[in-house]
Amino acid sequence: MFKKILCALLLALGSTGAIAAPAQVETVEKLLVVVQADQTINQVMTELTPQLQLQANQIVQHILEQETLNHEQQAVADKLAVQMLKTAEDSMNWNKLKPRMVNMYTSIFSEEEIQAQLDFYSSSVGQSIMQKMPQVIRQSMEITMVDLQENMQNFMGKDMEALIAELMQLQQGTAEKSVAPAS
């Protein structure tokens, strides 16, 4: 029995060397520089601006139940777009994102995997792919935004009307119960 326990212990201790080394913060930071993560975030924000303007216009149009906005209404939509952009910029600020990105990479990838990415993205092929990533991100966001806008419009239409009707019925039922005479 003792030999079995000793053998299992030796196997366990011997296999700890096979466990991948955790990613080092310094290596992850090098990777983020090579992949130009900060510039990608900035470019995404630049490309997000017109989409937020369109979304703000649609929100105001929906609230007012109008297809077109007059000058004053457009000013409100523009103000909403500025507020939405500021919120997005605050959320996507590189100084705030970088520590979280580093933490994410170090918790998911091993040092070997980070080094392999660093080697790849430092190569000419890796750099070529990185040059195309903003386009991939932009088109992905466009696809997502189209679906999201359609789904939100559907929700704001019939689904929201059904919820409002249900709430009104509940409110009327509560009002009738409070007015009903005691038996």
Image: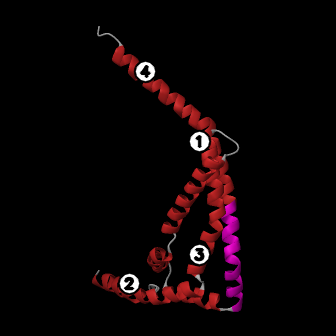
Identified by mark 3, the residue type is Asn
Eye-nearest disc, 1 or 2: 1
Q: Residue at x 68, y 65 (%)?
A: 140
Per the rendered image, the range of residues in magenta is 124-142
Identified by mark 2, the residue type is Ala
- Whether residue 138 appears in magenta in the rendering, the answer is yes
- Occupied quadrant, residue 37: bottom right
Q: Which residue is mark 1?
A: 63
Alpha-carbon span between mark 4 and mark 3:
52 Å
Q: Which residue is mark 3?
A: 42
Precedes in sequence: disc 4 or disc 2: 2
Element type at mark 1: helix
Q: Which residue is mark 2?
A: 12
Eye-nearest disc, 4 or 2: 4
Alpha-carbon span between mark 1 and mark 3:
31 Å
Q: Residue at x 52, y 64 (%)?
A: 86
Residue contact at pointers 4 and 3, CB within 8 angstroms: no
User: Which image quadrant: the N terminus?
Assistant: bottom left
Identified by mark 4, the residue type is Gly
Q: Is residue 61 left or right of residue 38?
A: right
- Whether residue 152 appears in magenta in the rendering, the answer is no
Identified by mark 1, the residue type is Ile
Element type at mark 3: helix
Precedes in sequence: disc 1 or disc 2: 2
